[in-house]
Amino acid sequence: MIAPYLVRIYALAFSGILPRTIPEGLNNLPNFNRWVAAIMKEPSVNKAWNSEMFVERTRARIFTVKS
């Protein structure tokens, strides 16, 4: 089950926590972009997913570790 990890990687990259080159590189793989797009639309993947909260909490954890 890789879908939850991909959703998190993409959320962190699009928020600037991870480099944007990560999803760009993954999207260059054959058929990967279509597969990820389908995963992102899947209701079972997104049912309990709150991107804003996840990114916010990750930023807070990073700040705490850096302090």
Image: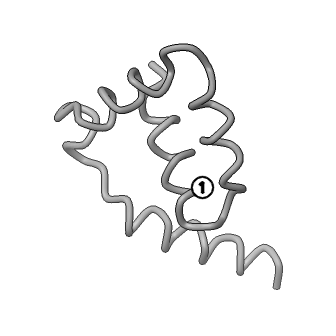
Q: Nearer the viewer, residue 36 or 1?
A: 36
Q: Dot 1, how many residues are within 10 Å of its Cα: few (below 14), some (14-19), or many (20+)? A: some
Left/right placement of residue 53 relative to residue 48 reads right
Q: Relative to 4, is 2 above or below?
A: above
Q: Position of residue 49 (x, y in %)?
A: 30, 50
Left/right placement of residue 20 relative to residue 2 reads right
Q: Quadrant of the N terminus?
A: top left
Outermost bottom residue: 67
Kind of element beneath mark 1: helix
Identify the residue shown where x is 49% and y is 66%: 55
Colour treatment of the image: one colour
Looking at numbered disc 1 in the image, what kind of residue is underneath it? Ala
Q: Relative to 65, is 36 above or below?
A: above
Q: Relative to 29, is 8 above or below?
A: below
Identify the residue shown where x is 62% and y is 30%: 26
Q: Nearer the viewer, residue 25 or 10?
A: 25
Left/right placement of residue 21 relative to residue 37 reads right
Examine the image and state in which quarter residue 37 appears. top left
Examine the image and state in which quarter residue 58 appears. bottom right
Identify the residue shown where x is 31% and y is 58%: 50
Q: Quadrant of the C terminus?
A: bottom right
Outermost top residue: 30
Q: Position of residue 24 (x, y in %)?
A: 63, 41
Picture mark count: 1
Identify the residue shown where x is 57% and y is 45%: 9
Residue bearing the label numbered 1: 13
Q: Position of residue 64 (x, y in %)?
A: 72, 79
